[in-house]
Image (tube, rainbow, N blue to C red):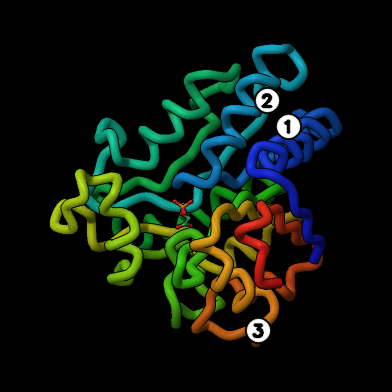
């Protein structure tokens, strides 16, 4: 595990540099992408690099971590909408190569097929992650088995509370389930990059990366990933 600490903006710049390097070396790479507040600044940096002609997504394929059950891509809080508006519509990517799990009319079998698609595309070269206050990665909540592929999860109450800020502060509007890449899917990525910001994440960062590896703290499994980088600001890394 490699840990890098800097300001939030510099963290986003350093993370963007990882992408510039990877896309330069392998323009056909496969990216695992994430949503939420954490990656927003990184996506800003990637858009700026692309507009400056320093990086191109032209031949890149992407797979997002997760999607709420019941929201289609036109819903402003769906993760497809987030990705389109924060990244895909702003760079030179071929949208037909961008994948976000479908939130509507999906059977368990169809959800699991997402893993086959990723495999057929060659596997994820660089997986981006945030971390939930309860240690979730993607939407793998505490006690989800480590060996699962893409599947449907019940969101933890803590996650629903944390995400209500995107739904006018109304808990009732937050979907209660999501499709998520499983821990197995995430751990199969060749390289994993987690970005953490703010004092609110300090406790869970300490627990996840300096405590025992346990399904009670899903992110703790990343201690066992052979190529894991944690990039965080001073507040988020203040307890380690
Ligand atoms: P956040 O979410 O980036 O909005 O804090 C992270 C997560 O839930 O994985």
Q: Secondary structure at mark 3?
A: loop
Q: Which residue is the site of mark 3?
A: 211
Q: Is residue 86 left or right of residue 189?
A: left
Q: For mark 1, does the 10 Å Cα neighbourhood hold few (<14), some (14 to 19), or many (20 or more) residues?
A: some
Q: Nearer the viewer, residue 41 or 52?
A: 41
Question: N-terminal of the two: label 3 or label 2?
Answer: 2
Marks 3 and 1 sit apart, C-alpha to C-alpha, by 37 Å
Marks 3 and 2 sit apart, C-alpha to C-alpha, by 39 Å
Picture quadrant of residue 202: bottom right
Above or below, 54 relative to 65: above
Above or below, 29 relative to 124: above
Could you tell me which residue is drawn at 23 percent across and 56 percent down? 175
Q: Are marks 3 and 2 in contact (CB under 8 Å)?
A: no
Question: N-terminal of the two: label 3 or label 1?
Answer: 1
Above or below, 15 relative to 187: above
Q: Which residue is the site of mark 2?
A: 59
Q: Secondary structure at mark 2?
A: loop
Q: Are marks 1 and 2 in contact (CB under 8 Å)?
A: yes
Could you tell me which residue is drawn at 70 percent across and 48 percent down? 126
Inspect this view and state whether residue 236 appears.
yes
Q: Which residue is the site of mark 1?
A: 28
Could you tell me which residue is drawn at 25 percent across and 47 percent down? 104
Marks 1 and 2 sit apart, C-alpha to C-alpha, by 5 Å
Residue 69: x and y in percent read 27, 54
Q: Classify the position of the N terminus by image quarter.
A: bottom right
Inspect this view and state whether residue 119 appears.
no
Total numbered badges shown on the rendered structure:
3
Q: For mark 3, does the 10 Å Cα neighbourhood hold few (<14), some (14 to 19), or many (20 or more) residues?
A: few
Residue 122: x and y in percent read 69, 47
Q: Classify the position of the C terminus by image quarter.
A: bottom right
Above or below, 84 relative to 120: above
Q: Is residue 193 left or right of residue 109?
A: right
């Amino acid at each position: 595990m490699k840990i890098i600490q800097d300001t939030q903006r510099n963290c986003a710049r350093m993370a963007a540099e990882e992408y510039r390097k990877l896309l330069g070396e392998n323009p056909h790479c496969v990216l695992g992408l994430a949503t939420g507040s954490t990656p927003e600044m990184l996506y800003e940096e990637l858009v700026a690099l692309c507009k400056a002609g320093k990086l191109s997504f032209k031949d890149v394929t992407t797979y997002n971590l997760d999607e709420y059950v019941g929201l289609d891509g036109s819903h402003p809080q769906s993760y497809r909408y987030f990705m389109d508006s924060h990244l895909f519509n702003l760079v030179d990517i071929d949208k037909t190569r961008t994948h976000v799990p479908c939130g509507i009319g999906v059977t368990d079998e169809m959800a699991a097929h997402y893993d086959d698609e990723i495999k057929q595309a060659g596997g994820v070269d660089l997986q981006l992650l945030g971390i939930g206050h309860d240690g979730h990665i993607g939407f793998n909540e505490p006690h989800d088995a480590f060996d699962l592929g893409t599947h449907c999860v019940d969101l933890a109450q803590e996650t629903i509370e944390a995400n209500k800020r995107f739904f006018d502060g109304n808990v009732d509007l937050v979907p209660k389930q999501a499709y998520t890449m499983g821990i197995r899917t995430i751990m199969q990525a060749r390289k994993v990059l987690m970005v953490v910001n703010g004092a609110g994440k300090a406790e869970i960062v300490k627990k996840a990366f300096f405590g025992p590896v346990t399904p009670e703290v899903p992110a703790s499994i990343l201690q066992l990933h052979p190529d894991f980088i944690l990039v965080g600001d001073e507040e988020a890394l203040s307890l380690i």
